[in-house]
Amino acid sequence: MEETTQKKSGMKWVWLIILAVIVIVGFMWWSGDLQTVIGSTDAYQAVFLTNDQVYFGRLTRADSQFPVLKDVYYLQVTQALQPREQSQASTNINLIKLGGELHGPSDEMVLNRDHILFYENLTEDSQVAKAILQSKAGNN
């Protein structure tokens, strides 16, 4: 009789531990601590939004309703207002690091998944990835 009581008590502890693990993992998934990273953790992604904006950075929590883009960059296109000649319309494209804007945002964007058209991994030899690495080397 005493042995049966000990077995029942031991099984209760096993089930409590299993339940606790399930609750902890479920909470971590729900809160985003189990972050989903697309591709390599060193890779950058291009994120295309429904408002025609494109941002570059490291995308995490891609499977959540609110993915997070960190180490964020975007393109800024400028054109000369009055080019010297019609055939010399100059266009400059600059890669800008998020954070220097007037409103002083932090270097992280929380996106609404409903506004993401698609995202793609950048290769190490892409012009954007190279420009990001050059920017980081220049800031050190």
Image (cartoon, rainbow, N blue to C red):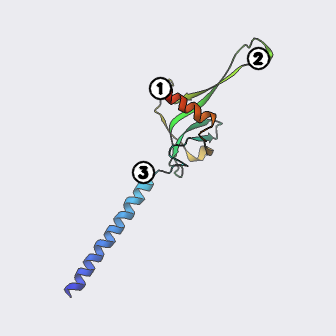
Q: Secondary structure at mark 3?
A: loop
Q: Which is nearer the eye, 31 or 44?
A: 44
Apparent side of residue 112 relative to residue 12 in the rendered image (left or right): right
Say whether disc 3 or disc 2 marks the residue closer to the N-terminus: 3
Q: Which residue is mark 3?
A: 33
Residue 26 location, quadrant: bottom left
> As shown in the figure, which amino acid type bears the numbered disc 2?
Gln
Residue in view at x 34 percent, y 64 percent:
20
Residue 18 location, quadrant: bottom left
Say whether disc 3 or disc 1 marks the residue closer to the N-terminus: 3
Q: Which residue is mark 2?
A: 88
Classify mark 3: residues with Cα within 10 Å, few (<14), some (14-19) or many (20+). few
* Quadrant occupied by the N terminus: bottom left
> As shown in the figure, which amino acid type bears the numbered disc 1?
Asn
Classify mark 2: residues with Cα within 10 Å, few (<14), some (14-19) or many (20+). few
**Rounded to the nearest whole Å, what is the CA distance between mark 3 and mark 1?**
30 Å
Q: Which residue is mark 1?
A: 139
Q: Which mark is residue 112?
A: none
Say whether disc 1 or disc 2 marks the residue closer to the N-terminus: 2
Q: Position of residue 92 (x, y in %)?
A: 66, 22
Q: Secondary structure at mark 1?
A: helix
One can see residue 63 in this view? yes
One can see residue 103 in this view? no
Residue in view at x 75 percent, y 11 percent:
84
